[in-house]
Image (cartoon, grey):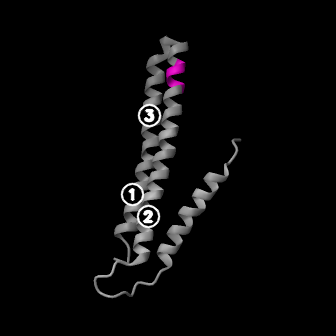
Amino acid sequence: MKKVTIGSILSLLLVLGLSTMAMAAEGGNAAGEFPMSLAVLCIACGVGVGLAALGCGVGMGHGINGACSGIARNPEASGKITVTMIIGMALIESLTIYALVIALILLYANPLM
């Protein structure tokens, strides 16, 4: 099991804290005023999608590295390795899309707007 770094724990707590503050704020403001909680929600959504894209990018890099190493060691198995790698990359990419969908739901299905 890999070590969990302090930075990753703090990043997770930051994202959870920002989204909690954004959802807990009251909605009554003057006309034309930009609510602070909406700004925090926008920042939280951006950070969430950014972290998801970062994690998926690192995962894709490791997957491609493993596939290239496998093909270099056994060129006859390149077809099977390539197909498996493409399926894995599609599944990893879907995680980023799920994070984007959740962020868009938080932004546009929001009672603050």
Q: Earlier in the sequence, mark 2 or mark 1?
A: 2
Image location (x, y in percent) of residue 100 = 40, 55
Residue type at mark 1? Answer: Val
Q: Secondary structure at mark 3?
A: helix
Examine the rendered structure and indicate whether residue 63 appears above or below residue 36. Answer: above
Give the residue at mark 1. Answer: 101
Give the residue at mark 3. Answer: 87
3D distance between C-alphas at marks 1 and 3: 21 Å
* Prevailing secondary structure class for the magenta stretch in the rendered image: helix
Range of magenta residues: 66-70
Image location (x, y in percent) of residue 97 = 40, 50
3D distance between C-alphas at marks 2 and 1: 15 Å
Estimate how packed mark 3 is, as few (under 14), some (14 to 19) or many (20 or more) residues with alpha carbons within 10 Å: few
Q: In terms of depth relative to the viewer, which is nearer, 20 or 83?
A: 20
Q: Secondary structure at mark 1?
A: helix
3D distance between C-alphas at marks 3 and 2: 32 Å
Disc 2 vs disc 1: Cβ atoms closer than 8 Å?
no
Q: Residue at x 38, y 78 (%)?
A: 35
Q: In terms of depth relative to the viewer, which is nearer, 6 or 61?
A: 6
Residue type at mark 2? Answer: Ile
Q: Residue at x 69, y 41 (%)?
A: 2
Estimate how packed mark 1 is, as few (under 14), some (14 to 19) or many (20 or more) residues with alpha carbons within 10 Å: few
Give the residue at mark 2. Answer: 43
Picture quadrant where residue 49 is located: bottom left
